[in-house]
Amino acid sequence: MPATSNTRKTVRRGVAAAAALPLLIGALASCGYGSQAQKDDAGTSAAPAADAKKLSASEVRIGYFPNLTHATALVGIQEGLIAKELGGTAIKPQTFNAGPSEIEALGGGSLDIGFIGPSPSINGYVKSKSTNLRIVSGSASGGVKLVVNPDKIKTLDDVKGKKIATPQKGNTQDVAFLNWISEKGWKVDPESGKGDVSVVRTDNKVTPDAFKQGSIDGAWVPEPTASKLVADGGSVLLDETGLWPDKKFVITNVIVSQKFLKEHADVVEAVLRGTVKTNEWINANPDKAKASANAALKALGGKELEPSVIDPAWKSILVTDDPLAATLKTESDWAVKAGLIEQPDLAGIYDLTLLNKVLGAAGKPEVSDAGLGAK
């Protein structure tokens, strides 16, 4: 699909895309650098001015991960860029480290809008029989790398016979790695991970220790895990970005509850104005945005990323309004090809009407839903 003018170059990278369905929903931990879902300990955003005009909802509950691939949410909330567009409607932020938990919150009515990877988006949509969510915008592309022990693996062919970690069976990186293995002509059982390559499903927060201890020889992982492994002596053997047309693929989407979209379209539109302006600010101010994202991570988790990790990770992430819908379909097809899922019906998973309205008002070109839009 064509690149758009708002799809700019800077923040390049961090976590997850492809598809795993109902069967795998319990095992999908999307792109978080951790494993559990939690309420945001940092509290709510600043209260709106007393005289600010409220939209059709007094508040909007927004979920996201404390992860660089969710830079739009981290920076947009930290800098007040989303709140500014909402006027008197307050933001109630919640953070999650697992895709299924965020989907459950959205489906259960405790969350209105979420930033999330493609796999849990597809999962939630299919499991609910197309009644739960819509993808209303893109957020980020890139940020996934194959990092290896350079003493054991020097070429791509050396990966055969080695132990390579992915975050979870059927998650975005797992599907992409299985597809890459298949294209090399090697065989791996998708359920057990055994074969010409040993695919070791390992939580991202455990992967660096496993790498240092030598229990894995490398990992196909999102940022900042990839840069953490490099800081620990690993070498980037392959950047997944290079495998995609135009070097772009979806890692983070913006989703919304179908009920909330129907009842509060004005609020959703305001949030999208905020995300579009946030992405524009990030791309125009990469260093300030990186510092803002790190400050947000510190506020949420009590610890910021070291320069040796955040600097390369940030460069590999591209924030974008474009959902890169065609790449989501490709990732879904890979999961089917790998034998992890049956062919899903993704018709109607996108509704880009409000995003394209916002982009048009900003003088930017519309983006495509690749034929998967709501009718």
Image (spheres, rainbow, N blue to C red):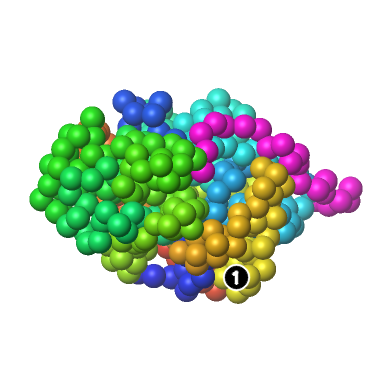
The answer to whether 2 is drawn above or below residue 232 in the figure is below
Give the magenta range: 30-53
- Amino acid type, label 1: Pro
Q: Which element type, helix, strand or loop, lies under badge 1?
A: helix
Query: Residue at image x 40%, y 26%?
Result: 26
Residue 137 horizontal/vertical position (percent): 49, 53
Give residue 187's quadrant in the image: top left
Query: Residue at image x 35%, y 48%?
Result: 219
Closer to the camera, 240 or 244? Answer: 240
Query: Residue at image x 36%, y 61%?
Result: 236
Q: Main secondary structure of the magenta part?
A: loop
Residue 159 horizontal/vertical position (percent): 22, 52
- Kindly identify which residue carries mark 1: 286
Give residue 295's quadrant in the image: bottom right
Please rate how many residues cluster around mark 1, counting C-alpha atoms within 10 Å: few if below 14, some from 14 to 19, many from 20.
Answer: some
312 relative position to 235: left or right = right
